[in-house]
Amino acid sequence: MTVLSRYMFREFLKAAAACILSFMLLYLVIDFVHNVDRLIRNDASAHEIGWYYLSLIPSVFVMTSPVATMLAVLIVLSMRIRGNELTAMYSGGYSLIRICVPIMAGCVLVSALSLLCSEILAPAANRQAREIRLARMKPGSVAAQFSGKRYWMRGEGGILSATIVDSDSKSLSGFMYFELDRQFRPSRRIEARRAVIHSDGSWELHDGEERQLKDAHPVERFQVRAYRFPETIRGFLEGETPPEEMTFAELSGYVKYIREKGYDARKHETDMHAKLSWPLLNILIAALAVPFALRGPRTGGVWRSIGLGLLVGFACWIILSASLSLGKKGIFSPLVAAWLPGALFLGAGATLFRIGR
């Protein structure tokens, strides 16, 4: 590695570290201001509060690193242009590609760290944060536990289980209800392919069957039937295991399981592909930042780069969020929904780069 490569790599790492830490600190401060009243009101100790925010750090790093990395690229190149360093490098026989190689190597490093963090640290840390949040922000609530590729919840009158929790439609797929008697023995079992919970608390079960376990009653099958259970869907919504609490292998296994059961896996499959595509945005968005920095004027300095970085980063975040939503709705395939934004960012960067040259 030449002196110039080491210099550009070091300058990028310093800018990336400053940007990532700033974004993470800003996020944590905003979250603390929003939740501190509930934490104190529910007698959360300083240890619990500290542990809660330490547990958020891995997921916040994964979430904010693409925009922070793009901002770092803009700052590093803008400062080199403003100080005429880029012109001096050109005079020394260095091409633009050779100048940018150390910066992109730094982006690859951040992308690798983001992927490792998403797979190794974030799942366990997010589970820990959710447990503290349920205990100290929503005390007394009963949350379903995810085990054996199903959700399980102990209710007032029985045990409830579901294969898929759809928080948007407030419905459950692969629903089972085991009613317990006073000796905590199962007395009735109800199964349904889909359960919808209405605003008045009633449950509407579709394509199911009911069986009395104590007596030799025949199985009653039904297409649609209304029930009144003492339990609500809140426990499933609060206990829903998000993709951030699963590794790629765990999420892939869950997607395979619900496919085999004949349920719609588009939402979870989109999240599965996003677990790989999101860390790689550190490289793809950075490729878009290079031509923006080169085409900008010499005036404005760092503050102009920061403003431009936030604007472009916000636009990229909107595109990615919209694409993932379309994938979960079935308009795009899950694979396309997760990888299309990155391809668009890379294509836009390559086009601007060629125009700029």
Image: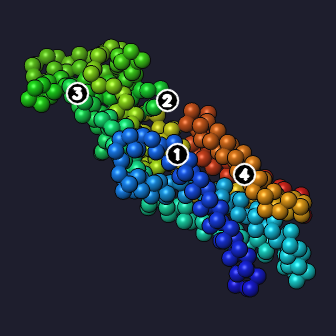
Do we see residue 22 in this rendering? yes
Q: Residue 55: x, y in percent?
A: 43, 56
Q: Which residue is mark 4?
A: 310
Q: CA distance from mark 2 to mark 4?
A: 30 Å
- Element carrying mark 3: loop
Is disc 1 surrounded by few (<14), some (14 to 19) or many (20+) residues within 10 Å? few
Q: Earlier in the sequence, mark 4 or mark 3?
A: 3
Give the mark nearest the N terminus, 2 or 1. 1
Q: Residues within 10 Å of mark 2 (few under 14, many from 20)?
A: few
Q: Is residue 186 left or right of residue 4?
A: left
Cα distance in 3D space between marks 2 and 1: 27 Å
Q: Is residue 136 above or below residue 108?
A: above
Between circles 2 and 1, the one closer to the viewer is: 1
* Mark 3 vs mark 1: in front: 1
Image coords of residue 100 (percent x, y): 76, 71
Estimate the spatial distance between the alpha carbons at disc 3 and disc 1, rounded to whole Å: 35 Å
Q: Is residue 257 visible?
A: no
Q: Is 331 on the left or on the right of 344, as rendered?
A: left
Which label number is shown at residue 168? 2
Residue type at numbered disc 1:
Val
Toward which corner of the image does residue 125 lie, by quadrant? bottom left
Disc 4 and disc 3: Cα gap in Å?
A: 49 Å
Q: Is residue 331 above or below residue 311?
A: above
| Residue linked to disc 1 | 33
Instruction: Examine the image and state in which quarter residue 219 appears.
Output: top left
> Which mark, residue 156?
3
3 or 1: tag closer to the N-terminus: 1
Image quadrant where residue 74 sits:
bottom right
The reply to whether callout 1 and callout 4 are in contact (CB within 8 Å) is no
User: Dot 3, how many residues are within 10 Å of its Cα: few (below 14), some (14-19), or many (20+)?
Assistant: few
Given the image, on which type of amino acid does mark 2 rest? Asp
Q: Which percent across, then down, holds residue 174?
A: 35, 31
